[in-house]
Image (cartoon, coloured by chain):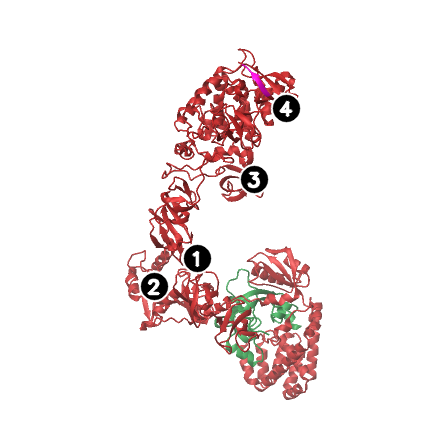
Chain colours: A red, B green
Amino acid sequence: MSDLEDHTAFDQDDEREHEERDKREEEDDHEQPRRRKYGDDEEDEDDEEDEEDEEEEVRSGKKGKKRIKRRHKRDSAARFLDVEAEVSSDDEGDEDEGDFGNDDFIETNDHIEDDSTRRHHALLDSRRQFDEDEDKSPEQIARDLSQRYRRTAVRYTGDMNEIPQRLLMPSVHDASLWQVRVKPGKEKDIVISLMRKAIEVEHTRPLQILSAFERDSLPGMIYVEARSSQQVMQACIGLVGVYPSRGIHLVPIEEMASLLQIKKQEATVQLHSWVRIRRGKYQGDLAQVVDVDNIEEIGVRFIPRIDLNPRDDGTAGGLDAKKRKKAATGATGALRPPQRLFNFEEVVKVHGRGAVSKRNQVYVFQGDTFKDGFIEKDFKPSALITEDVNPTLDEITHFSRKTDGAVGDSMVDLSIIAEASRKQAVAVLQPGDHVEVFEGEQAGVHGVVEEISQDVVTITPVGMDIEGQKVDLPARSVRKRFKPGDHVKVMAGKNTDETGLVVSVTDNVVTFLSDMTMQEVSVFSKDLREAAEVGASTNIIGDYELHDLVQLDPQTVGVIFKTERDSFRVLDQNGQVRLVRPHQISMRRDSNRAIATDAEGHELRINDNMKEVDGEGRKGRILHIHQSFFAFLHNRDVVENGGVFVARARSLVSLAPKGSLIKLAPGADLSKMNPALVAPTGGMVGSGNMGRGPRDRLVGVDVTVIKGPHKGYNGTVKDTNGAVARVELNTGNKIISIEKAKLHRRLPNGKTEPVEGPGASWGRNNSMGPPSSVPNRTPNPYSATAGAGGRTPGWGGGRTPGWGGGRTPNPYADSRTPAWNASSRTPNPYQTPAWNASSRTPNPYAADGGRTPAWQPSSRTPNPYAANGGATPARNANTGTSSWGGATPGRNTWGSGSGSDGWGGATPASRPDWSSEVWNAPTPASAPTPATAPTPAAYTAPTPALSAFSYGTGGMGLSAPTPGVFPETPGTMNFEELGRVPYSPGEDWILDTQIKPFYNRLKVTVHDTIRAGYLEGAYENRTAVVLTASRAGEGFDQTAYVRFVDDGKGEERSIMMKYLIPFVPDTVDEEAVVIYGQRRGELVKVRQRPDGSDTIEMVVVESVGTNGAAFWECQKDWMCALTR
Amino acid sequence: MSSQNFADEEAASIPTVKTKHLRACLLCSLVMSGGEFRARGCPNCEEILQLKHSPDRISACTSVYFDGLISNIDPENSWVAKWQRTANYVRGVYAVRVKGRIPEDVEADLDARGIKYRPRDQTDAD
C-alpha cells in the first residue's frame, strides 16, 4: 500500500516536472476544475466507470493468466515487451503487479531504481498486494487505474465513451468556434495545413488554436476552435486560400454541436433496390442491387450493352483481347449499343468463341460477368445514383423478363416500387387532405389532415366516436381517401393534369372517368387531388396550343381544336379532322397579319366576327386565315369539332357591318382613305407578296431610348401596341417593350426627334411602302368603295410642265436652298408646322403646280420632299441625307432661271405672319426680294393640272395614282409619298374671277408688311375686308381697296395685294369661299371646328352655294373666310 | 496529464494535402493514409485493432467513407475533441463521421473490457 502511494506521489511529482516544462500549464490547471463541472450526472457516470474498472480489475485477476497471454500475443506493438515478459515469467500469478511495473517503466523509465524497489515488493509479497488492493478505497483504486490506463497511450480505453453525448455540450468555459471563409474546395487542405503548421511551429511559436475542422456540407468555410479571433487570425497567417479578411465569425455556443452533427444525406442502399449508373457506357441505366455485403463495392445487376456490330470487323479470334477491348470502348463513344440481355450464341457469333468463357452458370466476356443474361458488376457507391431513381414500369419489366427464369412468370416484384411510392405518398400529403388509415390500430379511421411533421400526420377523424380528437399517425399508414363522385385531378405520373369524376375506389387505386377522353383511368390515390377545375391545363402540349394554326404537311394546315394528353385533334383546311401528335406538326403558323376578302369585298382579319353567307350560315370569330382563302372560325355554340370550323373567306360576311370607308361626315378621318394606310382589297387576293396589312408606321424605325433603364440604347421598332413599342436593341439582340414616349426617332443626320406627337410626321415616310409596292396598290379602294376616284394620271402629267416652266423663275430658289437644307437636315425643329411654313414659302410664287402634293387630300403624309415636286423621286424615295444632297442640284436648276427677276412680291418681311415662329429660321432666304410681278408662267403652268385634277366633286373624289405616272415623270412626285402641303395663294389671288363675287365679304389679313417696311408695318396683322380690286397695269403693284374690320373704326384704304393673305376660317359655321382647287369660288360653310395652327388641316365644309349642298373636306388654307 | 506529455511528443502522421485513399479508423476516427495505417497502425487503437502490417485488419477496421476533417491540435483542451471523444488521443487529423462499424470481434473485445463501443457514424443518439 505504502509503496503504491509512494508511487502515486512520485508520479505526481513526475508530472509536475513535466508540467513545468509544459507550455500549456495554465490552461491545464484551468481545465482540471472545469472537468468537474459536468454536474452530478457525470460524477455518477464517473463513479460507475470507476466501478466497472474495478470489476474489470477483479475479473482480470481471476482470469489473469489467460488474458495476459492473449495480450502478449496481440500487443506486438508494445515497446517493452521484454520487460513485461520478464515480469510475467517472474510471477505469472501477479500480472497486475506486472502491469503496474510495466506501466511505470514505460512512463518513467529513467527512475529505474524506484521501479526496481517496487518490483521487489511485488516479488516479495504478491498475495499481500491483493489484500492491500482490497483494502484500498474504491476511489483510490479507480484513480490509480485511470491514471494507469490513461498513461498507456497504446492501450485503448474509450474512457469517455460512457458519457452521453448531451453532457458533452459546450459550456462557456470551452473555447469558441470561429467560422473562417476559405477557398471553396480547399477546406480539407486547409484543415490539414493547419495541423501541419501547428506541429511545425509548436516549439517556436505554437499556434493558439485548439482544433480546426471542416464539413463537406458547408463549403467555403472552416471552423477553428480558439479562445479569441486574434488567435485564429494568427493561425491563418501564411495559409493560401484562407480569407480571414472576409470576417472571422463567432459561432454561437448553441450551434457548435450542430456543426459536428450534420449528417450527409446518404441513402443506404438496400438489397434489390433500384439504382442508376452514374457514368460510363451504362450511364443512366437502371440497375438492381444484388450485393450490399461490402459497402465499398456494391454489386449490381443490369442489362448489358454489348456491341454486336463491332466497328472492327476483323475476326474476333484473330485479335488480341486488348485491341478488341479498345475497339469496343471506341464504339461506345460514338453510339452506345442498345440494351440487350446477354445471349451466348449471339456474342460468340460476333466476337468469337474464345471471347467468352463459361464458369459454372456464369459467362465471362470482356472482363464482365454475365448471369441470366444480365451483367453483374461491382460499383463504388459513388458511381451509383441511389436517389430519385424512379424506375419506370418499362425498365422494370425488362428486368423481370428473365429474372424469373424460363417459367415465363412475368410478374414483377413491385414491392420495392410500392415501397418507394409509399414513401412518396408521405410527401404528397397536405394539410386539408382527406385521408384514411389503412393499417395499424386505427385502420378504417378517416379524417382530415391537420398537421404534418415529418413522418407523423395529425388527423382529425371524421364520423367516428373519437370525432373531435386529434390522432397522430405514421404518415405511411394513411392514404388519401376519395369516394365515388369526387372530382379529382392527377398530380403526377403520365396522366398528369387529367381530371375526372371518381367512379370507383379499390384500396389505393382510384378509377375515374376522365373529363377529356371520357375514358376510365386508374391511378394511385397518392397521385390524386380533389380539384374543381376541369382539365383545361392541357391546352398546351409542347409548343402547340389550342387553336393554333399548324402546318401538317406542305399542302395542309389545320387548327387545333382539341388537345388530348399527348396528341391533338386538328381540323385541316379541307374540313378533315385529324389526330396528330406534336411531332407530326412541322410548324406553327402565324396568321396574325393575314387578311382576306369577304363576300362583299371587304377585308377580313382574324378576330373578326363573321357569318357564312351560304351553307349553314354559321357565325364565328375568325381564328386564322390561310392563304387568304380559308378562314378558320370558332364559335362556342358549335358543338362539332370544339366549335372550330373552316370556311372560304369569300363566303363570309362581316357580322358588324363595316362603315363605308369614305364618309364625308363630320369627324370622318380621311386618313382612312389613304391607300398607304388602308389595306388594299380588290385585286390583292392571292398576290403572294402582298403586304401583311397595315403595319404601324413606327415599325422598322430606328430609335433611341431617351428614358428609363435603357436610356441611350439604340434599336429598331419591331412592333407597337398602343403606347408601347417593342424595340429590338442593337446591343445584345434583345427586344424590350417600352413606351413610345421614351423613344426618339434616330435621324440619318444623327439627331433625334420624338416618335410620337408632332414629330411623328417624319416617320411616315418610313411607313410608306417602297415604290415597288405601288403597283400593288393600283386598285384604289376609293374608286371601289366610296366612289371617290378620279385622281387621274393627269395629275402627274399635268403637273410636270407646271413645275418645269412655271417653277423656273422662282426667286426664292437660291436663297431658299439653304433653308430647305436646313429644315430637311434638322427635321426636328421644323416638324410639322415648320415644314409647312417653309414649304409654303415658295408657293406664292411657285404657282399652283408647286402645290401639287398638297392637293392630294388623301395622303396625310406630307412628305416635304414630295412637296418639292421637282426634287425628284430620289428624294422621295429616300429620306437619307445622301439622297438629299443629290436632290439639291435639282433645286438649283429649279431656281436658276428665276434668279433675280424679282418674283418676290412676298418680301421676307411678310413671312413671319404666315406661320409660326419657326418660320424665321430659314430667313436668309429672304434676301433677294425685289418684288416683281409674277411671270405668267406661274399661272399657266398649274392650269392643266387643275383641270386634270378632280378633287372633291361629289362622287369623283380622288383618283388612283396610276403607276404609270411615276416612271414617266420622275420630276413629279410619288403619289404614295405625297402629303398635303400648305397652300399659299398667289399674290394676286384676290383678282381671281371666281373670288370676285365675294368682294365686300372677303376677309384678308395684312401680312409681312413689317419686314417689307410697307406703310411702316402699321397695318400688320390687321384684318380687313376686300371692298374692291382690279388688275393694275403691267409693272404696277396690284392693290386692293379694303376696309379694316377688326377695330370697329372701319378705316378704309388700299393695300398692296401682295400683303394680303386670305383669312383662314377658324370657327364653325363660318362662311368661306374656296379659293383654290376644283371647287374654287364655291361658297361653303365650315362644319367642323378647325383647330390647331395647322393650316393644312382638313375641315369638313358644306357647300351652300348654287352648286347644291354637299359635305366635303377642304384643306383649311384653301379657303378664305367671309364676313357675314 | 501524462497523456498530454504524450501528445506533446507524439502526433499521428499527418496526411499530406494530396494524399488519396485516406482512411479513417472506425474506432477512434483518426484519418491517415492506408499506407500509414499499414506501417504504423493506429496510434490510438493499435492495442485493440492490431492494424500494423495487416491489410485485412485495415480494410476491416478503417473506412474510406468518412466526412468532415478535424485537426486536433490540442486535444486535451479542445471542446471539439471532447465532443468527438478524441480528447485523449494523439494529435492528428480526425474525421467527424466515419461510416461503418468495427468488426464484431473487436466489438466483443471492447465489450469484454467493459468499454462501451460508440460507432463513429453518429447513429447513437444520447
Task: Give the labeled residue for mark 2.
Answer: A340
Amino acid type, mark 2: Arg
Comparing labels 4 and 1, the label whose residue is closer to the camera: 4
How far is mark 4 from mark 1, CA to CA? 76 Å
Q: Is residue A990 above or below residue A201?
A: above
| Dot 2 and dot 4 within a common chain | yes
Disc on res. A741: 3
Q: What residue range appears in magenta? A: A1025-1030
Chain of the residue under the numbered disc 1 shown in the image: A
Q: Is residue A141 above or below residue A594?
A: below
Quarter holding the C terminus of chain A is top right
Residue A326 lies left or right of residue A123; in this view the side is left
Q: In front: mark 3 or mark 4?
A: 4
From the top left corner, tell me how far across and down residue A807 is, in percent. 48, 19
- Asked whether residue A52 appears in the rendered view, the answer is yes
Label 1 SS: helix
Residue that numbered label 4 is attached to: A1046
